[in-house]
């Protein structure tokens, strides 16, 4: 008699924004190729909106990934109320998909509001929840969301030792907390060095960018707990404009306040305020193209976590503006400034003069995705958690 074939362990990975795919592409590829695992992808959120993710679903399919379920869970509007309602709609939609797919593990990345709804639904359906990047500190509501997801999760993959300590402080069993490094920096380390970022000129509109010469990147997203997103973006645009280097400006993500930042960009561009005619405006780039462009940039300006994580490994100088990344572990490549035009300008000039920084390994560990895959394929599944309290006995 032949042995009964062992069933594959099913891993469900919800993709609610472009970064969930872009920064986990290496991990998703390994999970898909593992004969002991079945990868289930659920796509929803802004990745299904034309203005944010029109290129990502086709690119995922071209890369060999299958999207098992799609969630039309976004209430557009870029406000706090639409963000809250989207979280509620995500819970309703994802409950149906999760019931249908019936995975063994739900793997959640980060701290977006949709992911909190995913974690809640998964917990109520008695699924083992694994969380990527718990324990980090940030300066917005995202930090509260991140910690809430931690408390709903059973397996924790953190990016640094400080984060591991915080997760354990929250009552999580140390045996289930793994410091594996950042999948973001691992992916950045694997992008073909021959890519020069030139595909930026195939996206968006504006000036052509010669990526072999000095240029800036600007990525500034809304801070959901602040009220002056438009004015803050105007200060950044004016500072970058005065520097007068070729610049790639990215449109903001879909969090509450996105319309304010988008309006600042449109008004500044369309009312003829730009003195610098060497600016290109784009919505997004595919993962490899983004890293290639980032690697060649003179300075990354704004408040993206890419400046904290990927840039630490790549040695790219960063001017980090405002409170969005407050508390995150950062390398010497980051200069923190407030929302003041002159302060931003001075910091950009200082970083241009400094040039590239030595590579930092504060977030990088070799084999991050392989370690995550191995834990997911072997770890004991459970749904009922217990608060872990260290005793002296």
Image: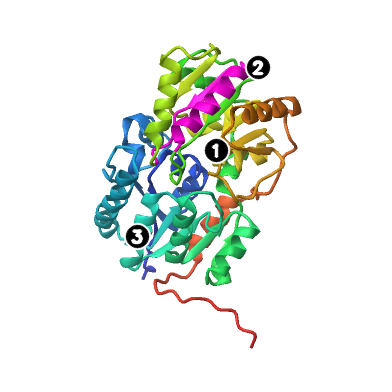
Task: For marks 2 and 1, give the one nearer the viewer.
Answer: 1
Q: Which residue is mark 3?
A: 103
Which image quadrant: the C terminus?
Answer: bottom right
Residue 40 seen anywhere in this rendered image of the structure: no
Residue found at x 65% / y 85%:
392
In this rendered view, identify the residue nearer to me: 239 or 56.
Answer: 239
User: Does 47 appear above or below 121?
Assistant: above
- Image side of residue 315 versus residue 227, left or right: right
Residue 142 position, x and y percent, is 46, 51
Q: Which residue is mark 1?
A: 303
The question of residue 242 being in magenta is answered with yes
Stretch in magenta: 228-255
Q: Residues within 10 Å of mark 2 (few under 14, many from 20)?
A: few
Residue found at x 45% / y 46%:
225
In this rendered view, identify the residue nearer to me: 191 or 386.
Answer: 386
Name the element at disc 2: loop
Q: CB of mark 2 within 8 Å of CB of mark 1?
A: no
Name the element at disc 3: loop
Query: Looking at the rendering, which quadrant does residue 105 occupy?
Result: bottom left
Residue 349 position, x and y percent, is 69, 25
Q: Residue furthest bottom?
A: 393
Check residue 213 in the rendering and tell me which mark sits there, or answer none. 2
Residue 46 seen anywhere in this rendered image of the structure: yes
Separation of residues labelled 1 and 3 (CA atoms): 35 Å
In this rendered view, identify the residue nearer to me: 86 or 50.
Answer: 86
């Amino acid at each position: 008699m032949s042995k009964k074939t062992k069933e594959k362990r099913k891993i469900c990975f919800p993709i609610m924004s472009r970064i969930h795919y872009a920064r986990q592409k290496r991990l998703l590829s390994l999970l898909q190729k593992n004969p002991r695992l079945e990868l289930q992808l659920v796509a929803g959120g802004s990745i299904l909106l034309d203005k944010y993710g029109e290129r990502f679903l086709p690119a995922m399919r071209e890369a060999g990934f299958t999207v098992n379920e799609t969630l039309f869970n976004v209430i557009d509007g870029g406000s706090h109320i639409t963000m809250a309602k989207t979280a509620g709609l995500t819970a309703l939609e994802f409950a149906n998909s999760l019931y249908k797919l019936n995975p063994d593990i739900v793997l959640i990345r980060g701290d977006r509001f949709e992911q909190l709804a995913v974690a809640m639904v998964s917990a109520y359906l008695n699924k083992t929840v694994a969380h990527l990047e718990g324990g980090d500190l940030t300066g917005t509501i995202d930090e509260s969301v991140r910690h809430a997801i931690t408390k709903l999760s059973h397996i924790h993959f953190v990016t640094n030792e400080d984060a591991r300590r915080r997760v354990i402080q929250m009552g999580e069993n140390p045996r289930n907390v793994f410091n594996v490094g950042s999948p973001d920096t691992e992916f950045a380390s694997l992008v073909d060095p021959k890519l020069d970022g030139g595909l930026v000129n195939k996206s968006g509109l504006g000036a052509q960018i010669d990526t072999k010469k000095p240029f800036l990147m600007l990525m500034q997203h809304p801070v959901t707990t602040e009220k002056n997103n438009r004015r803050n973006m105007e200060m950044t645009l004016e500072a970058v404009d005065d520097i007068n280097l070729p610049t790639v400006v990215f449109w903001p993500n879909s969090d509450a306040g996105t319309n304010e930042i988008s309006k600042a960009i449109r008004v500044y561009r369309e009312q003829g305020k730009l003195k610098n005619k060497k600016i290109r405006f784009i919505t997004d780039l595919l993962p490899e193209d983004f890293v290639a462009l980032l690697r060649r940039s003179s300075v990354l300006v704004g408040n993206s976590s890419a400046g904290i994580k990927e840039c630490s490994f790549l040695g790219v100088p960063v001017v980090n503006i405002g409170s969005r990344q407050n508390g995150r572990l950062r390398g010497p490549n980051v200069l923190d400034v407030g929302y003041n035009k002159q302060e931003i300008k001075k910091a950009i000039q200082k970083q241009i003069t400094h040039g590239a920084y030595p590579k930092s390994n504060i977030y990088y560990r070799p084999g991050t995705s392989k370690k995550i895959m191995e834990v997911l394929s072997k770890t004991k599944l459970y749904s009922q958690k217990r608060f872990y309290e260290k005793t002296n006995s």
